[in-house]
Image (cartoon, rainbow, N blue to C red):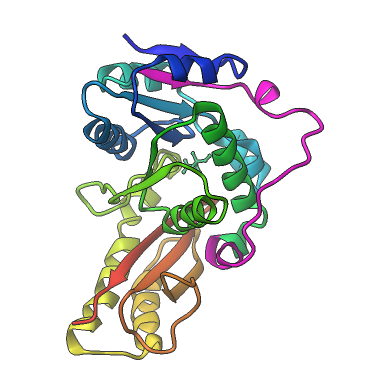
Amino acid sequence: MIKVTSDVKTITQMTRDLPGPLAVVPTMGALHEGHLALIRRARQLVGPGGTVAISIFVNPIQFDRLSDLTNYPRPLKSDLALCEKEGVDLAFTPQKDFFYHSDHSVLVTESLLSKRLCGLSRPGHFDGVLTVVVKLFNLLQPTLAVFGDKDFQQIALIRRMVRDLNMPVKIVGHPTVREPDGLALSSRNIRLTPEHRKDAPRIQRSLSAASNLAVTGEQNPAAYLQCAKKHLLANAPEGFSIDYLELIDTKSMQAVSRVTRPAVLATACYYGEIRLIDHINIQDQ
Ligand code: PAF
């Protein structure tokens, strides 16, 4: 039977009392198959004798647009039912007023990798993510934490933070889970209009079409970017726009001047108000 608590004061003792090792899956709720895959991976890693905990918290300080925060889905009851079904041992569901002091003034900032891509278009976003992750790690004290690879910049930043601040948590990435039509699962997908939802697999198709250039030995980043852009924009519906499209080195997050492994073609696109991200690894053939 799942234990559910929103109590920030007792959560640390609660996780200490549970049998270890402890794997945590940090989420903002609105759980989908992608999250369930993270939960299953967490269970696999700690085994039947370990503990799997999930946090469900729509973290206000990582939102750069109030409308996005306000409209973020919060189906807590059905999320908890899913967790129960997946055999999660503990769900931590803090309330924002008890999680952040009204005069909280300390943020965790990464000063290099966070300045590109999503960090550039969403100022303050990664400060909010890293801060909440540190707070969750401090409160839950997990052995390991599982995050989706879809948010590849996020997980790179969390790994960097854990390394640079000597945090005793193992970070595990799990491959992106997709709809049968290729759209990467995201809690934001349910907010797409039917027309935009139908069109949204164009993002993955475009990245994939560009990545096929690797087979020809293409090393010019411009060729990949042009190809992806062409596919992204061809007969795109009204309301669609590209926020960024970049071919970057995975370690530095800087644009590459020649395509050699490991490089990532990454994009963020808007369907109206809804911003979706996706990326693909470009293999050196
Ligand atoms: O990826 C997410 O859902 C969030 O950014 C995270 C890691 C749970 C922090 O709020």
The picture quadrant where one finds residue 217 is bottom left
Residue 106 among magenta residues: yes
In what quadrant of the picture does the C terminus appear? Answer: bottom left
The location of residue 13, given as percent across then percent down, is: 52, 16
Q: Nearer the viewer, residue 46 or 190?
A: 46
Q: Is residue 13 magenta?
A: no
Q: Tell me which corner region of the image, top left, top right, bottom left or bottom right, holds residue 15.
A: top left
Image quarter in which the N terminus is found: top left
Task: Determine the residue positioned at 45% across, 23% down.
Answer: 75
Name the side, left or right, on which 271 lies relative to 264: right
Residue 4: image location, x then y, percent: 45, 13
Against 284, residue 96 (above or below) is above
Q: Is residue 92 left or right of residue 214?
A: right
> Residue 88's quadrant in the figure?
top left
Q: Is residue 200 above or below residue 258?
A: above
Front one among 8 and 239: 8
Please report the bounds of the magenta region as a residue range.
89-118
- Give x and y (percent) for residue 161: 54, 53
